Amino acid sequence: MAPEQSSAFAPGRVNLLGEHTDYNQGLALPFAIADGVTVHVRARADRRVQASACDLDEQDAFDVDSREPSSGWRAFVRGVVAELSDAGFAIPGASIEIAGSVQQGAGLSSSAALEVALSLALMEIGATAESDDAQRPLTRIETAQLCKRVENDWVGAQTGLLDQLASLYGAPEHALRIDFRTLDVAPVPLALGDWRMVVLDSGERHANAASGYNERRRECARACELLGVQSLRELDFEQAAALPTPLDLRALHVLGENQRVEEAVNALSREDLSAVAQLLSASHQSLRDLFSSSTPAVETTVERLIGDGAAGARMVGGGFGGNVLALFAPGVQPPSEAREVKPGPGAHLLA
């Protein structure tokens, strides 16, 4: 028998390295953060969904069987309900309350945190299928894939699995090496010691669906089409450089970013934060010059952090605005308005 109410928390994430690699079957090194989204769900008998975004003082209402599209946070709620229903969960109707502490549009994956928290909470109350057999909970990989469908088909952002996997698999004091070709997720100790990792908001909001994110994804797909490969992971640097511009630049970024992830994993095994900081700056240069995903506001923020003594800094998220991540060596004080970030636990149900 499914419970009548359920609550779940899902964190946002910071991606240490590996940007725009997930949908190219590459490598990434994210970690979950303390900020996230909390969802409270109470089952209803009338097959209606009443959803409230507490932070925005906004509401939505629709039938469980509705497939009517919407926008903003409402698209995520409607998409999760529909995708879970299609997966065999008997959603009886629900009253949903949503509250978040992760900044929206800042490159910290507030959207994935919302999708994942909704999925975990709604799976609990829909655990009994219409057949006599209880519907088994989805695995973390399956949950991430469901959330990706919501992002792609209901919200219109052609994202990969990076944000959802980081939110679902997060662990304190660990980053996650994710291989998107095999979907292998391996914890990597992230021992900061006296180093400090911070994010500083560029002040420019971004929305993946409306930014250049989808265009970059199309360019990567076109590069694969021209070379007859399934993903950019299959290329070497010589093949990438032979592509027409700007496709060559996009592919070279992805290949270089995969290398930087592996170098960062090795550096973390040695607790060499200086090397990681240098990789952050190299990643930012590649995102700016090869992937063309920076903005003047982001560049100003990077320059400020480096000027304030950061050992390395780069944009995080899909680019085109949002936060900048920086590493500060022991004894160097970050700007007062920067927010310190550390690896935290992954998504989970609440008592």
Image: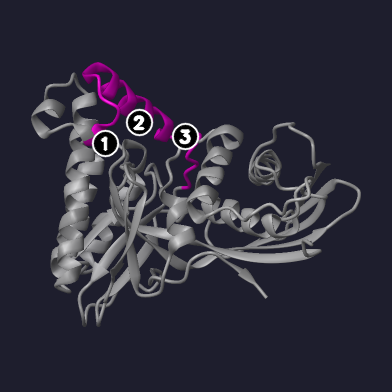
Dot 3 lies on which element? loop
Under tag 2, what secondary structure? helix
> Which comes sooner in the sequence, label 2 or label 1?
2
Mark closer to the chain start, 3 or 1: 3
> Are dots 2 and 1 in contact, CB under 8 Å?
yes
**Does the rendering let one see residue 281?**
no
Q: Amino acid at mark 2?
A: Arg
Screen quadrant of the N terminus: bottom right
The residue lying at 31 percent from left, 46 percent from top is 19
Q: Which residues are magenta?
A: 205-233
Query: Which residue has dot 1 on it?
Result: 291
Residue at horizontal 55%, vertical 38%?
A: 149
Mark 1 residue crowding within 10 angstroms, few (<14) / some (14–19) / many (20+): many
Type of amino acid at the residue the image marks with label 1: Phe
Query: Which element carries disc 1, helix, strand or loop?
Result: loop
Q: Residues within 10 Å of mark 3 (few under 14, many from 20)?
A: many
Residue 208 among those drawn in magenta: yes
**Up/down of 309 relative to 84, above or below:** below
Find residue 216 and name its label.
2
Foreground: disc 3 or disc 1: 3
Q: Residue at x 43, y 59 (%)?
A: 13
Image location (x, y in percent) of residue 164: 48, 52
